[in-house]
Amino acid sequence: MLVALGALTKSAQFPFHFWLPRAMAAPTPVSAYLHSATMVKAGVFLLARLWPVLAGTDAWMWTVGTAGLVTFVLGAYAAIFQHDLKGLLAYSTLSHLGLITLLLGLDSPFATVAAVFHIINHATFKASLFMAAGIIDHETGTRDLRRLSGLARAMPYTATLATVAAGAMAGVPLLNGFLSKEMFFAEALDVAGPAPLLDRALPYLATLAGMFSVAYSLRFILAVFFGPPPSGLPSAPHEPPRWMRVPVELLVLACVVVGVIPALTVGPLLDVAVHAILGERTPAYSLALWHGFNVPLLMSVVALGGGIALYFALRRLLARGVDGTAPLLPPVDGRRVFDAVLTTTTTRWPRAAERWLASRRLQPQLRWLVALALAAALAPALTRGLTAGAVADGALDVGLLLAWCVGGACAVGAAVQAKFHRLAALVLAGGAGLVTCITFVWFSAPDLALTQLVVEVVTTVLLLLGLRWLPKRMPFRATAAGARRALPRRLRDLAIAVGAGTGLAVLAYAVLTRPPAPTVADFYVERAYPEGGGTNVVNVILVDFRAFDTLGEITVLGAVAIAVYALLRRFRPAKESTEPPPQQLQQTAQDVHDDVLVPGVIMRAMFAPIAVFAAYLLVRGHNLPGGGFAAGIVFTIALILQYMAGGTRWFEERLRIRPVWLVGSGLALAAATGAGSWFFAHPFLTTHTAQVTLPLLGPLHLPSAFLFDLGVFLLVVGSTGLALIALAHQSVRAHRAEREP
Amino acid sequence: MNEIVVAAGIGVLAASGVWLLLRPRTFQVVLGLSLTSYAVNLFIFATGRLRTGAAPIVPPSAGANPAAYADPLPQALVLTAIVIGFATTALLLVVLLAARGLTGTDHVDGREPDA
Amino acid sequence: MIPPEHLVVVPVVLPLAAGAAMLMLDERRVGLKAGIALAAALALVVAAAALAVRVDADGTQVYRLGDWAAPFGIVLVADRLSALLVLLAAVLGLASLSFALARWHRAGPRFHALHQFLLMGVSGAFLTGDLFNLFVFFEVLLAASYALALHGSGVVRVMTSLHYIAVNVAASLVFLVGIALVYAVTGTLNIADVALRVPAVAAADRALLEAGAALLGVAFLVKAGLWPLCFWLPGTYAAASAPAAALFAVLTKVGVYAVLRVSQTAFGDGAGASAGFGAAWVAAGGLATLAFGTVGMLASQDLPRIVSYGLVASSGTLLAAVGLRDEALTGAALYYLVASTLAASAMFLIAELMERGRAPGAQILAVTAEWLGDAEDNEAPERDVGVSIPGTLAVLGLAFASAALVLAGLPPLAGFLGKFLLLDALLGRAAPDAASWTMLGLLLASGLAAIVAFGRTGIRRFWAAQDEGVPRVRVVEFVPVALLLVACAVLTAEAGGAMRFLQDTARTLHAPGGYVERVLEVP
């Protein structure tokens, strides 16, 4: 069905016929080729191809037949009223295509023969007419039928050719158009379709359309070539150059020859084509010129006479006509309708749908994500049933409970305060982080606690540096209406949040009360020292068992640091936040000096101890809590202290090593350590241990994992430092921007 | 009972975090992500079950008994997650600053809602 | 130089080493860095191709990192699917890099290193056999993609990136919860080991396991761009600089890959009570996504956005195919995946070239230039834009038409074959059900929508407005476009060989026993 629709569109059948007349603006040979030969025929060809498969069904007859009939009649009718030469031809093409389609839709083998025959005939006469129209356009500079007249005197040769072709189009005997039209009339008489009334009407409609086609053919010839000599043409007409005529001559010759001796010329070709479609069902048909006096002949005569009469009756009306709209037809501009339909279906509806289906705002996206995650986790719990595990609850640690009372309060407080009191919220969130930290210590995870703590510190410093540039939040001027409007939204968000929290808590409880499954972790505990060379199992996992994770993780850190650096190079603070804060305005340089003098000295002095501590963490990491990451962060904290003591400029002047280089070298060191094992014919990241005896310190157990950890350390210092420096540097830049506006 | 306390703690952290995540101001979103990541880190940690006084630091002799130590693997995972969370928080912070600088507002969509 | 048994790890280590080396070089040594980056990208393509050949000949390759056996250590597993996708990513990497070399790599600092890290993340995600390691590589590729999405800066990029980052960070948290649940129930992180343990999970624990799997699914589907989790995608990809967007075309495929790998391996037919878990939902979501992408293509005006929606539609197609769990369908979907990714990537590049001569593009550049006007910045993307070469418009038009044909699934290029194979597989299913017919209809509709959308843009650019001036394009910028399109053409010409490879891929995917045995070295 859809294919048939597509084919109908392609062959410009009603109601998809609008595009064809509009395509006539193309240069002549192109449109001749396009209209008469290939393009529209492609659709018809498709229908013809489908005929064996689909014909015979009622749906086929209804859609294809009806579309063809309507197009046939309406096209012919509209063609009469066209003022543009090519417009006339285009509508007549429409009509002929309708005829072919109708024939294909009639579901009789003989009609199909007629259809194929007409395809061939139409191609010859219509192409020659289009070329004639092109010649006229070329010679006179206009295609308006109201302005053209009497060209037969200037170009008799062209006139003759065009007249013959138009005769074929009208179905004048001795020309090919007559033959296929006869076949059609004969077929129209004995059709037996699903609707008797329509069958009865078909011969009349066919004759009517035949009249129309005679009328527009006549109009084409008479208006262009006969009548008074033309006046006011853009250029003086004369015969076209030789090479423009040749194709027309050939085609017209074909019309005549086929018309006179059909069986000898087009017979074999038609035979092949028809057999391709019909196969076994090919009927016996005759291509003779004279079938004797019968009804089809009568219909032809009526059509010829009627058409001539119709033309002369309409002649005055046509000459006066202002535009190419046929009377009695609703003045619907097909193209406008088509455009409107196209815009609506392919642009407006999708736009509306996009707006409805998607959102460019962030909050709905996050809401969807959380809601879907919640649903995803909930569904199995509901279908399978989730129960708490069998592990008996232990005693309650009051300390832990107290800590979590504080922690929970902090979290909720942070959630409430984050809008208006950012600093307070930050401190509260830090409190929640601290309780997390305590929990880690409580339940045997010193490494986690240490790392969480130092990360907490650096994150807070980063956020504090960032807070400076956010807009001042005015206290909420709540209007009652605004609050009411916001209420459903806030309630929904609250429900989602509480749902997510409850869900995660339930899952956690369900996990916690189940006995642990046999895990791969046992392997780690057993092998950490004998094979991994370290007593801190967590660290051994990080730098040995699962060192590949760590390698990825530090790459993340490095990439992020570069992103931060890149972004802040382009950073422009908003105007109102470049003003120094009021506190700073009240201070004098002397104040600042006095205020930070004592802490400054202490902070500067702290550098060396903290750096040593970092080194200690790094070295002992394999055996005790610590490791490259924690050490790197601690070292960064030492750097931060120098910043605070000396100020941004002081620090940047003394910064010797570029942090980006540190990032690169850290990554390179880690990767090189991993690749080093290739030289020992082991896979990537295989650890090797060397016993090094250092003076003073004695023997040292130095696995290659230590080098890897050193790479981690370098990278962490580099990237954290990079981010901090880039962020802190903004204050320098803001002041400079202020000075040189 | 400790299990209930920790589970409830995870729940409260997650709820606060998600609530902030759905708010319209960039700073709220950053803080929300950071609170949620605490909750998620604790959750991963919880899959190793809760053990007191069993830090996974083995004596330097062969044949440590796995049953005597807390599950070290979730701890290692959490460490990685903490680092990655730290990195993304830093990035988001800087992006929000850049957005603030470029658009003049701290709304997540770069313009104030037309209320 | 490197023994062949280490070939599996090369696609990860090579970009890492190249990226790290370039970080240690000074920013001003543009030429040297371009050389290193190009060499690394070329070497990556060669390595990936060698890996694919090796895997096809010798079967799945397992690489034990740190020499620890699975499931204790992390293993990289290169089967046909992984090797193919790594090769695809490497080709896109080479194309986007050579495109960037014309000028984009100077639009912001450290482009090359980030580009390498992104490739590293993608390769790692395709190769790893470990759930948590998959998370880590997701983060690597995300971190690098955040940075690349921001590359060039400007208001639009910063705002879309803010959304992109926020959504994906939240999704990563969901991912972590999923991993934690799977670990809590099965006690392992290795995908093959999980697959081995899933059938034996106690009934009481199954809810937890499936909740974990569902959460993993949500996290993967955010990356894959499932409706309604994909609203960030068109904006971010359309705003990103062309070479970045061209590489991003493969990122949604990482999500699809993860869904395919985890569901087929751990929740395939052998998963006991959890067999086929969530597949129906993935299929339904995929169909919705396909419809959404179709609508979005029609609703969009500018080319990058249309292509982005095209990616959404192709993600939907793939997810629906994955969800229907049919071997022939999977093979066809993989062919479609490769063809559509190549064409989408090429189209992002073509779009940039087309827009270059036009006012809106110029305005965007002007905005960028304004933000570039910092005293410390020495890079200038507008410098050296190149001269208009004769026939630019014709070549560009031809490239546009070819890429559009592939994306719309019209003959004669690979896109048609891909769609045709999908339709064929759909009709060939044992019992074509409602889902098959819906997918069939949606596939045809999305092809039509793609024709309309690309046709509209093409007419506007190449036909209607001759007076807008020819874009100034350098010859070298055509090279990557040509590379991608030639890859498409080769895929069409060698369809027989490709389909043989892909059907083998689908067969091993649908019978994951071999994968599990190979990884865990079960005799």
Image (cartoon, helix red, strand yellow):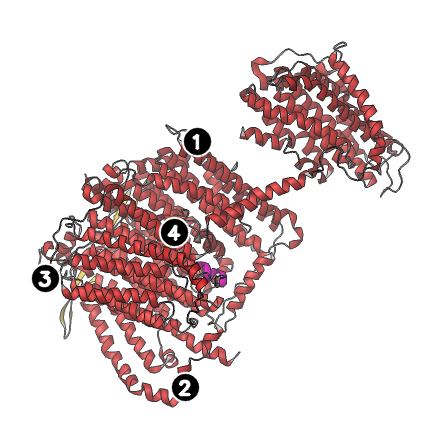
Mark 3 crowdedness (10 Å alpha carbons): few <14, some 14-19, many ≥20: few
**Do marks 2 and 1 share a chain?**
no
Res A108 visible: yes
Element under disc 4: helix
Could you give the CA–CA distance between mark 2 and mark 4, rounded to whole angstroms?
48 Å
**Predominant secondary structure in magenta?**
helix
Between residues A378 and C439, which one lies in front from this camera angle?
A: A378
Task: Please name the amino acid that badge 3 sits on.
Answer: Pro
Looking at the rendered structure, whether the residues under marks 3 and 2 are on a common chain is answered as no
Nearer the observer, disc 2 or disc 1?
A: 2
**Is residue C69 among what the camera can see?**
no
Q: Position of residue A430 (x, y in %)?
A: 28, 69
Give the residue pinned by disc 2.
Answer: A586
Q: Chain of mark 3?
A: B
- Residue named by callout 4: A368
Residue type at numbered disc 2: Gln
- Return the residue at label 3: B59
Q: Is residue A158 above or below residue A672?
A: above
Position of residue A674 relative to residue A290, above or below, is below
Give the Cα separation between the discs numbered 4 and 1.
35 Å
Residue neighbourhood size for the residue with mark 4, other residues' Cα within 10 Å, grouped as few (<14), some (14–19), many (≥20): some
Q: Which mark is residue C424?
A: 1
- What's the chain of the residue with tag 1? C
